[in-house]
Image (cartoon, grey):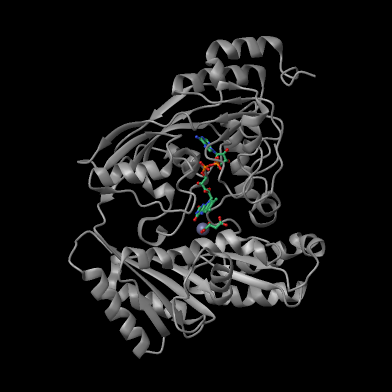
Amino acid sequence: MNSLEKFPEKFITDLKTIINPRDFITDEEQINPRLTDWVGYADGKSSLMLTPRNTQEVSSILKLCNNYKIPIVPQGGNTGSVAGAIPNGEIILNMTKMNSIREINPKDYTVTVDAGCILEKVHELAIKSNRFFPLSIGSQGTCTIGGNISTNAGGISVLKYGNMRDLVLGLEVVLPNGEIWNGLRRLRKDNTGYALKHIFMGAEGTLGIITGACLRLFPEIREKTTAFASLRDLDSCIELLELLRSEAGDSLSSYELIPGIGLGIAITYGDKIIEPLSKRYEWNVIIEFSGTKNDGDTKLNLENALNKAIENGIILDATIANSLKQAASIWKIRKAIVEYQPRLGGEIKHDVAVPISNVPEFIKEANDAVRKVIPHIRPVAYGHIGDGNVHYNVCPPLQYDNIKFKEKTEEIHKVVYDVAFKFGGSFAAEHGVGVVKKNEMIRYKSDTEINLMRLIKLSIDQNQIMNPGKLFDN
Ligand code: FAD
Ligand code: MLT
Ligand code: ZN
């Protein structure tokens, strides 16, 4: 069967009048990389990918799809972690060719971009205008602004600047019926009824296509100091955070937990990663101070704060990077944990948030809980603890059967999320729900919340053409 035969002939003919032939893609070689995700959760299918070049084309495509009730899956860089952009037979609407910078306005500290712009391009552009765009995540060379907004991405600077949601001033969205909502305002204040932009942020493509965004910029960062410190114990991560905040306030821009096992992964499997301290400790943090002046203050303040922490017995040892190269090699440890953790025989991932002060208790109780399911299981809890977000991943015990480990996935998920829930936490801190966490939506969200979400979905997307089967089942 021709790959397009499942679609009405007239639909395809009309589609071809809307979109240029080079953006109407049926070639498997181009589509196949768009059908799987990097985590290995999904094995998607689709016979057609559309790559629109402007908002008007997106609008015409959605209008046509809506008329024929033909569903679509929005996709940006396809770096998401919960299979939210993976089609299950639907048309892929890939946004990466809509990648222009529309306007940068340094006086207003704003930049307006197409949704398919790569995050790193926005960073580079901001720097050229002596400005700074703070969203910082490992996938920034590939992920798009539309994807960042749709997942409300987090990353390593949330404790200072907030999530993606906090960095968006205005949006342009194409609604499922093709109508274009131009909400591209550059305002910091706009109390004019419901804040509609927030409905589309974190919606994971279930309510419309984000085609453009006006983003907040910040004063240029001229100085950064990075340190790696070993903690007395897990509890002291909160004491150290308090001390850093009271010593340096706003200049604390990253605070990431690095467990000894994670450091071991980085050193064993990463590319020429150097042991940062003379001895390996069970719990460590990467700390970054940043500032808008180039006067050596970030280094001085961090040195003073770490000296105090050593005097108070909060940390046992620390090293401060003396060059950009040394700072990069500290951050390489953090990146390598994500990349190489599966080498410990597989991983079961959790992206959990709890109130910041509960992070140590959460980790300890989650450790107890997963060890009851599989004795000697190896937790690798790392991540953005400065904002309460723990990537609580677990690896199998040494020599453990891989299939047996995978079979325990649901049970492990349940005990970990139950502990997070007990602390008033979230089962999906920054990666979203996608298809991977739909069961958790039902288990942990109240009926009131789910019903409100469904009401919003149905009032905007009556024909349910937008990213079906994501967040919850239609
Ligand atoms: P995609 O994966 O293509 O799509 C994600 C979701 O958004 C899907 O539901 C899709 O349907 C929807 N979507 C995409 N574009 C649009 C649009 N224009 N309109 C409407 N809906 C749309 N995430 C974090 O939050 N913090 C991290 O620290 C982090 N680190 C990462 C590190 C690595 C190495 C990798 C590979 C991923 C990491 N991620 C992280 C996850 C991921 O990069 C983010 O979720 C990112 O925001 C996804 O952007 P994307 O363009 O790739 O979106
Ligand atoms: C990170 O913080 O590096 C990522 O969110 C980890 C991940 O995507 O699993
Ligand atoms: Zn993360």
Q: Quadrant of ligand 2?
A: bottom right
Image location of residue 283, percent across then percent down: 51, 78
Q: Please, is residue 144 above or below residue 432 in the view?
A: above
The residue depicted at 19 percent of the width and 62 percent of the height is 294
The residue depicted at 33 percent of the width and 48 percent of the height is 133
In the image, is 123 to the left or to the right of 173? left
The residue depicted at 29 percent of the width and 44 percent of the height is 126
Q: Nearer the viewer, residue 177 or 213?
A: 213
Q: Residue furthest front?
A: 272
Q: Please, is residue 154 above or below residue 341 in the view?
A: above
The residue depicted at 47 percent of the width and 38 percent of the height is 146
In the image, is 405 to the left or to the right of 50? right
Give the position of the C terminus as an image quadrant: top right
Is residue 72 visible in the rendered image? The answer is no
Q: Nearer the viewer, residue 436 or 347?
A: 347
Number of labels in the image equals: 0
Q: Residue furthest left?
A: 295
Image location of residue 154, percent across then percent down: 47, 54
Is residue 80 visible in the rendered image? The answer is yes
Q: Please, is residue 290 above or below residue 362 in the view?
A: above
Q: Nearer the viewer, residue 90 or 28?
A: 28
In the image, is 121 to the left or to the right of 9? left
Image location of residue 449, percent across then percent down: 60, 49
Give the position of the N terminus as an image quadrant: top right
Q: Nearer the viewer, residue 9 or 36?
A: 36
Q: Please, is residue 302 above or below residue 165 in the view?
A: below
Image location of residue 399, percent across then percent down: 77, 72
